[in-house]
Image (tube, rainbow, N blue to C red):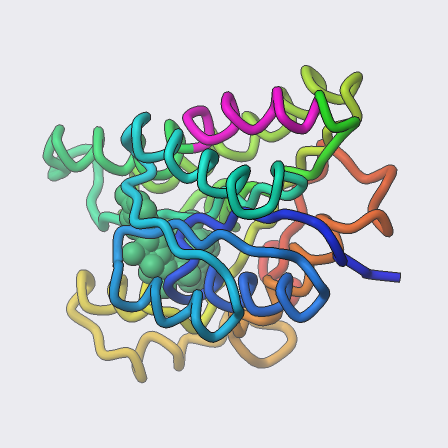
Amino acid sequence: MIDLSGKSAIVTGGASGIGRATAAVLAELGAGVVIADLDAERGEEVAKEVGGVFVRCDVSRAADCDAVVAAAVAAHGGVDVLFNNAGIIRRSTVLDIAEDDWDLVMAVNVKSILLMSRRVVPLMAAAGGGSIVNTGSGWGIKGGASAISYCASKGAVVNMTRAMAIDHGPQNIRVNCVCPGDTATGMLADEARQLGETVDSFYADAADRPLGRIGQPRDIAQTVAFLASDAAAFLSGAVIPVDGAGTA
Ligand code: NAD
């Protein structure tokens, strides 16, 4: 049922973790993939692995996002699937967050979706439709400790998803949000470091893990592939935890 043959996809944050796994799964299912990321070395590596195109890009910068969309059009003739996935976390409360850090997290996690989508939506509309998937977080649904800017940003991603689904549904553009729980990526290792923990001690906290494990990037990637495909033709405006019942 999930066939992405002939589709053109953009994956932001595609050099690592969830984005990297998603670029691989989308390519396995037949899509042509453009990988957009700050990290040129790893991005080029992923592009080679999946037979895709890499574009170095800071998703918080408008000109960079425009260039990514232009590259997808040049390589694949349009954009059918946009995975707005690049994201960062800073561990702090309202008492200790630097204003610059607040602005950076909001720009990378939230404004990027605006910058990418405003170029992609008209292309999708002209082509008769498309699928946008945004990466939220369990903490965008339920909140979490000591990550005030991250929780605010992911709450915004969740509700921006719903608003976009309403605005662009009439053009047959579906917009959904995946909300990963703890997933084994560089971000989780970075969080552990910011909290002064080791990756092992961080992974050992199993209280919110009914399936008895944390997520693997491919767990999220497969959900994104389904949402990207015609198998999900009537699925839009949904906020989907992919967390082994963590938020449940
Ligand atoms: P990751 O750190 O492995 O990958 C993130 C990628 O985004 C990196 O390749 C990085 O270079 C890129 N990136 C960062 N800033 C960028 C920028 N300004 N422009 C372009 N690229 C940029 O992390 P991940 O865990 O794969 O994170 C992917 C998404 O999943 C993020 O939105 C994150 O918030 C979300 N998420 C992750 C977890 C988790 O436990 N790993 C949980 C919930 C949500």
137 left or right of 39 in image: right
Residue 196 within the segment the image draws in magenta: no
Q: How many marks?
A: 0
**Residue 88 can be seen, yes or no:** no
Magenta stretch bounds: 113-125
Please say whether residue 230 is visible from this viewpoint.
Answer: yes
Overall secondary structure of the magenta stretch?
helix
Residue 161 vs 245, above or below: the answer is above
53 is higher (above) or lower (below) than 123: below
Going 53% across and 47% down the picture, which residue do you hit?
75
Query: Which one is in front, 219 or 155?
Result: 219
Quarter of the image for residue 197 reads bottom left
Q: Where is residue 73? Give x, y as percent.
A: 54, 37
**Depth order, front residue of 231/47:** 47
Question: Residue 92: which quarter of the image?
Answer: top left
Image position, residue 7 (x, y; %):
70, 49
Q: Which residue shows up at 47% across the image and 35% down it?
A: 69
Q: Residue at x 62, y 36 (%)?
A: 78
Residue name at image x 79 percent, y 27 percent: 128
Quick one: quadrant of the N terminus? bottom right
